Image: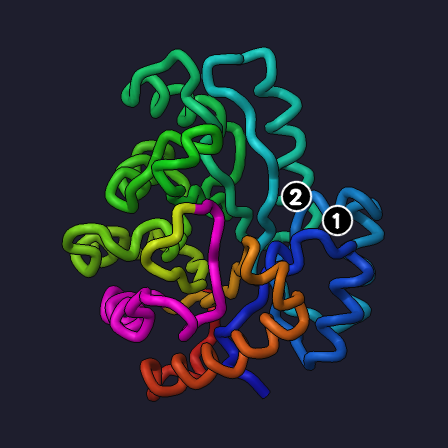
Amino acid sequence: MTHPRLSVSAVSSWHASFDDDLEMWQRLGIDHVGLSLRKCEEVGLDVAARRVRAAGLRVSNVVECGWCALDDRAAWPAYRDRLGAALATFGAITVITTGPAGSLEWDAAADAFCALVAPLDGARLAVENTSAMRVDLSFVTTLRDTVDLAQLAGTRMCAEVNSCWAERDLARTLGRAGRALAHVQLSDWRIGSLVTPDRCVPGDGDIPLAAIVRHLDAAGYRGAFELELVGPQVEHEGYESAIARALTRTDALLRESLADRGDESLH
């Protein structure tokens, strides 16, 4: 059995279907998962929820919720409805990007995001940081800005490690996030790659994951560490092989770095 805080995202098998994921998770003995809203919608949210319960799966979060442009208020109601359905159906942390700022400068985009999510349950909504190469997804491209935005919006936040690992004073930023930090996405990356996304199995790249896990632990984070592997290296190796290797390595990493935390309940 893998570490109880180790989870696998359905994003790690990007092109696989919802049913394909269920079958692979069963073969690999995975019982702690992150769901893709996109994949769940393909089979119907109620159907997906029933199948997840029947499989005995613990759900760490729901992700792949899409986005809408913050300068296009006409698109907001449909996006809110989609997020609301995810929150109501699965009752789990729902991880989102801000959506592109469009014509808005940073502060105006932050105000728009706050207005967009205000009617939703901020305690179960987590905004994640993205790479600066993906301003089509988000205008918060550092973990520092993500902490600030979550505090402004009254939401929680997700630390996407692949997009923030090289930031200055990361440990202090994680400490400042405090209880707002609701979820962590883990993967590795090889220095020199000019492709995005180009994540790889933990241990295959150059991110100092053990140090970052220790920083998270010191900051008081007690949630899931979720494998979110996506990109050409994972596609080339194959989902099942890459995920199986990632489970083995990350389980060992967590057991070493969180030696006294293995039995703690997730919040």
The question of residue 202 being in magenta is answered with: yes
Q: Is residue 75 left or right of residue 43?
A: left
Residue in view at x 39 percent, y 46 percent: 194
Give yes or no for contact between labels 2 and 1 (Cβ–Cβ under 8 Å).
yes
Q: Left of 156 or right of it: where is 62?
A: right
The answer to whether 65 is drawn above or below residue 169 in the figure is above
Mark sitting earlier along the chain (2/1): 1
From which residue to which does the magenta span run? 195-221
Instruction: State the SS at label 1.
Output: helix
In the depicted view, which residue is nearer to us: 70 or 223? 70
Of 177 and 192, nearer the camera is: 192
> Which mark is drawn over residue 233?
none
Establish if 31 lies above or below 226: below
Which image quarter holds the N terminus?
A: bottom right
Please indicate, yes or no, whether residue 44 appears anywhere in the rendered image.
yes
Chosen colour scheme = rainbow
Q: Nearer the viewer, residue 235 or 182?
A: 235
Amino acid of disc 1:
Cys
Q: Residue at x 39, y 81 (%)?
A: 253
Secondary structure of residue under mark 2: helix
Q: CA distance from mark 2 to mark 1?
A: 9 Å
Residue 76 falls within the magenta-colored stretch = no
The kind of residue on which mark 2 rests is Ala
Quadrant for residue 208, please give it. bottom left
Observer-side mark, 2 or 1, equals 1
Please say if 256 is above or below 224.
below
Q: Which residue position is annotated with label 1?
A: 40
At 30% from the left edge and 75% from the top edge, which residue is drawn?
210
Q: Which residue is mark 2?
A: 86
Q: Position of residue 234 (x, y in %)?
A: 58, 62
> Which residue appears at 69% of the width and 39% of the height?
85
